Image (cartoon, helix red, strand yellow):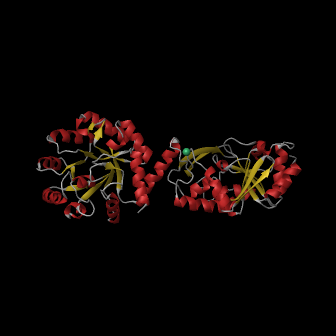
């Protein structure tokens, strides 16, 4: 393709004199190369004219056309070491100015936003949306929770080095390709053929508006859903964690039994799901009470180093020997013990003496008996209630319609176990059994509940932690 042919092809594709064009390109895609890269860039400049502006990103692996623009005698460069650009033409200086001062590389005040505000176009020549850097602007404007700070340095014209930390910098992987159809459907993108290449012209401002709408509905809108992509699994976890922290009053924990057998495995699973509270009930397939104080201390130190807090130590029985459990709690510096409502006060006395919070769970017993015993214990001890809906199902009660209405027990609720089961005692995933778990979660959210929701607490969950988090998240989405 000669440069004259390229000029007319670019005009046919919709480029006009005075346009501001951010070009991402693959020179080789043009095919029949009767023109040099220099003449190809000249063809763009000729079409855009004196009042037009051509911009290219100059970070990462540069294409041939990008190199030509960067080295062009009239090129203006932005002064940042990340996401930097080169521009030629009428608005080049204005677009490149003050990039260093921006809080984010791609967001407010950056060249990418200026191009959009000036009515510019993103041009993809022989490359797909994966190369569309301006889509990072949408991520930055949305301040998506998986974005992070990034520090880099550059040398100034007088030879000094300066460095800076930019906020909301994009992560290691994303899936921009899937956005192509939205741009097509919204009528903000034209695709034509130039040489062997597909040339896409997208209205930058409309593109960013559309992406912000998509991102407001689904903050994971540019993440891939490949479960083998560790980057996107982690980025989705950050979105979930942010959602719980910003939008909910409760704290979300998981039982160790549901998360895994061994400490590193449990840490991995919690990180993968964006959870930071762990209820220590079982480790390595056995009740936590079988660990030595030293081993428990080491395990808790490992969790803590990984940013995981222990919400409680949990036993499914009232321990016969207070000394043993007290030694464990003290060694690991854990201040909360969950156990079934006891029939005597020996354990509660010992816990109170050692300033451990006692959290008392209903075991297989109807709500009338639970209430009676809880009220009499709560009169003497500061204790909170752990509501286990599966155990009420086991006691043949409807957890929300009957057991929930038991007064004092509920007023002191510090935890709801997020589990479910059927009347014939089969464990089920959430809202597939008779535990009325959706109603219970909903009513507590109405009360602005600030205690723990514990996935897999006090009952077996038929699935792994990831499944439980997905089921829980689906329930929240449907409330
Ligand atoms: Zn991915």
Residue at 32% x, 40% y: name it: 300
Q: Quadrant of the C terminus?
A: bottom left
Residue at 27% x, 49% y: name it: 425
Q: Position of residue 173 (x, y in %)?
A: 57, 45
Q: Position of residue 366 (x, y in %)?
A: 18, 57
Between 388 and 402, the residue placed more toward the observer is: 402
Between 186 and 303, the residue placed more toward the observer is: 186
Residue at 86% x, 44% y: name it: 35
Q: Does the rendering let one see residue 106?
A: no
Q: How many marks?
A: 0
Q: Position of residue 293 (x, y in %)?
A: 24, 35
The correct choice, above or below, for 37 with respect to 141 in the image is above
Residue at 41% x, 47% y: name it: 467
Q: Is residue 258 left or right of residue 101?
A: left
Q: Is residue 79 left or right of residue 374?
A: right
The correct choice, above or below, for 419 with respect to 188 in the image is above
Q: Is residue 322 left or right of residue 133?
A: left
Between 71 and 270, the residue placed more toward the observer is: 270
Q: Is residue 25 left or right of residue 463?
A: right
Q: Does the rendering let one see residue 364?
A: yes
Tell which quarter ligand 1 is in: top right
Q: Position of residue 261 (x, y in %)?
A: 34, 37
Between 402 and 316, the residue placed more toward the observer is: 402
User: Which residue sits furthest front?
Assistant: 424
């Amino acid at each position: 393709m000669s440069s004259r042919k390229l000029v007319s092809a670019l005009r046919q594709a919709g480029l006009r004199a005075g346009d501001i064009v951010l070009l991402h390109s693959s020179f080789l895609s043009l095919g029949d190369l009767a023109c040099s890269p220099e003449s190809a860039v000249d063809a763009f400049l000729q079409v855009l004219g004196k009042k037009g502006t051509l911009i290219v990103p100059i970070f990462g692996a540069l294409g041939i056309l990008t190199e030509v623009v960067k080295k062009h005698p009239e090129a203006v460069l932005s002064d940042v070491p990340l996401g930097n650009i080169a521009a030629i033409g009428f608005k080049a200086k204005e677009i490149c100015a003050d990039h260093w001062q921006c809080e984010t590389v791609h967001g407010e005040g950056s060249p990418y936003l200026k191009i959009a505000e000036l009515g510019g176009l993103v041009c993809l020549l022989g490359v797909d949306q994966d190369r569309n850097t301006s889509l990072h602007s949408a991520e930055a404007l949305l301040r998506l929770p998986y974005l992070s700070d990034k520090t880099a340095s550059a040398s100034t014209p007088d030879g000094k080095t300066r460095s800076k930390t930019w906020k909301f910098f994009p992560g290691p992987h994303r899936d921009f390709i899937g956005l192509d159809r939205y741009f097509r459907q919204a009528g903000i993108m034209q695709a034509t053929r130039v040489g062997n290449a597909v040339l896409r012209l997208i209205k930058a401002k409309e593109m960013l508006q559309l992406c912000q709408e998509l991102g407001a509905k689904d903050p994971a809108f540019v993440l891939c859903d490949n479960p083998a992509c560790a980057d996107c699994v982690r980025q989705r976890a950050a979105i979930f964690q942010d959602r719980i922290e910003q939008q909910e009053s409760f704290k979300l924990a998981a039982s160790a039994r549901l998360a895994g057998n061994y400490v590193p495995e449990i840490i991995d699973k919690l990180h993968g799901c964006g959870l930071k509270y762990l209820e220590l009930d079982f480790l390595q397939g056995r009740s936590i009470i079988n660990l030595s104080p030293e081993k428990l201390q080491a395990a808790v130190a490992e969790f803590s180093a990984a940013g995981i807090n222990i919400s409680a130590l949990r036993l499914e029985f009232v321990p016969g020997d207070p000394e043993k459990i007290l030694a464990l709690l003290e060694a690991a510096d854990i201040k909360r013990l969950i156990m079934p409502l006891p029939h005597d006060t020996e354990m509660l006395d010992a816990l109170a003496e050692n300033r451990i919070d006692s959290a008392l769970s209903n075991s297989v017993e109807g709500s009338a008996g639970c209430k009676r015993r809880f009220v009499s214990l709560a009169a003497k001890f500061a204790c909170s209630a752990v509501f286990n809906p599966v155990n009420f199902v086991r006691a043949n009660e409807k957890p929300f319609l009957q057991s929930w209405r038991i007064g004092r027990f509920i007023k002191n609720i510090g935890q709801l176990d997020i589990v479910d089961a059927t009347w014939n005692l089969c464990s089920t995933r959430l809202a597939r059994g008779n535990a009325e778990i959706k109603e219970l979660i909903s009513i507590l959210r109405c009360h602005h509940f600030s205690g723990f929701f514990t996935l897999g607490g006090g009952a077996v969950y038929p699935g792994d932690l990831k499944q439980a988090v997905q089921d829980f998240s689906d329930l929240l989405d449907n409330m």
